[in-house]
Image: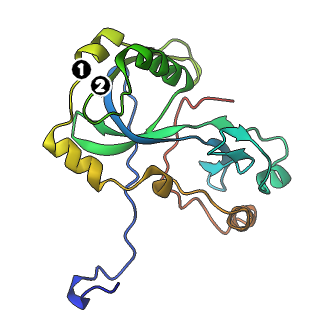
């Protein structure tokens, strides 16, 4: 379907990929939509920036390593290990914006346990806000603890407001925001990286305490 000439922006519109920024101390988000299972390689680019690239050996739907698709990262970086990188969308109560919420494995495990009693946190009518505390307990980037505040979660069970529902309805599905490359696309990008012809054009941000599989 076409659009009116005067309505055109004249260029491609980028999907919003604003990430939720974990804060020291108390955090709160309202999760919604589908969970996106992924494993990610972090590859050092020619400018020293870590670039995320999806592991194609991992099947999102089956949630296991099937090795059905060719994963070219293994050819270019045979010693590189991929990291657990499940994501979902959320509403950040501090500004009301929809953001990508990059889960932490231990935090997700706690949410799943709480959901056995509180129900699905992503339910638009009977869901709940995920309240948790982030505490750094050592000098390294991975020395971080995430503790779900279950009582606060329980007290936050409520239907979404009209404004929140509108934001959810307008949100692009997460599997489109974080689209999976084909093996050919992955190979092409790796070759460009190796020649120094490309730095990352991804909208994903670097997570200072990502989980290692």
Instruction: Give whichever of discs 1 and 2 has the lower sequence position.
Output: 2
Q: Position of residue 112 (x, y in %)?
A: 48, 21
Badge 2 crowding class, 10 Å Cα cut-off, few under 14, some 14 to 19, many 20 or more, is many
- At 65% from the left and 50% from the top, the residue drawn is 54
In the picture of the structure, the residue carrying the numbered disc 2 is 128
Q: Position of residue 169 (x, y in %)?
A: 28, 52
Q: Pointer 1 and pointer 2: residues touching (CB < 8 Å)?
A: yes
Numbered mark located on residue 179 in the image: none
Badge 1 crowding class, 10 Å Cα cut-off, few under 14, some 14 to 19, many 20 or more, is some
- In the depicted structure, whether residue 89 falls above or below residue 53: above
| Residue 191 as seen in the image, left or right of residue 75 | left
- In the depicted structure, whether residue 181 falls above or below residue 161: below
- At 69% from the left and 30% from the top, the residue drawn is 213
| Residue 81 as seen in the image, left or right of residue 85 | right
In the picture of the structure, the residue carrying the numbered disc 1 is 156
Question: Is 199 in front, or is 115?
Answer: 115
Q: How many marks?
A: 2
Q: How far is mark 1 from mark 2, CA to CA?
A: 5 Å
- In the depicted structure, whether residue 96 falls above or below residue 68: above
Question: Is 208 in front, or is 75?
Answer: 75
Label 1's element? Answer: loop
Q: Position of residue 51 (x, y in %)?
A: 61, 50
Question: Is 21 in front, or is 28?
Answer: 28
Label 2's element? Answer: loop
| Residue 198 as seen in the image, left or right of residue 13 | right
**In the rendered image, which quarter is residue 172 located in?**
bottom left
């Amino acid at each position: 379907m076409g659009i009116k000439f005067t309505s055109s922006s004249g260029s491609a519109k980028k999907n919003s990929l604003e990430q939720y920024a974990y804060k020291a101390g108390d955090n709160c988000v309202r999760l919604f939509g589908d969970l996106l299972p992924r494993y990610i390689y972090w590859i050092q680019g020619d400018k020293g920036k870590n670039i995320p690239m999806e592991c194609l050996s991992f099947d999102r739907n089956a949630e296991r390593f099937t090795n059905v698709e060719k994963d070219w990262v293994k050819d270019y970086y045979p010693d590189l290990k991929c990291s657990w990188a499940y994501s979902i969308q959320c509403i950040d109560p501090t500004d009301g914006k929809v953001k990508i919420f990059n889960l932490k494995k231990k935090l997700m495990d706690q949410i799943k346990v709480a959901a056995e009693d509180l129900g699905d946190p992503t339910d638009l009518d009977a869901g709940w806000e995920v309240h948790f505390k982030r505490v750094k307990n050592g000098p390294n980037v991975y020395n971080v603890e995430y503790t779900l505040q279950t009582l606060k979660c329980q007290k936050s069970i409520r239907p979404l407001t009209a404004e929140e529902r509108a934001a959810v309805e307008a949100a692009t599905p997460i599997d489109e925001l974080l689209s999976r490359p084909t093996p050919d696309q992955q190979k092409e990008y790796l070759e460009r990286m190796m020649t120094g012809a490309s730095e990352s054009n991804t909208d994903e941000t670097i997570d200072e305490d990502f989980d290692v599989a």
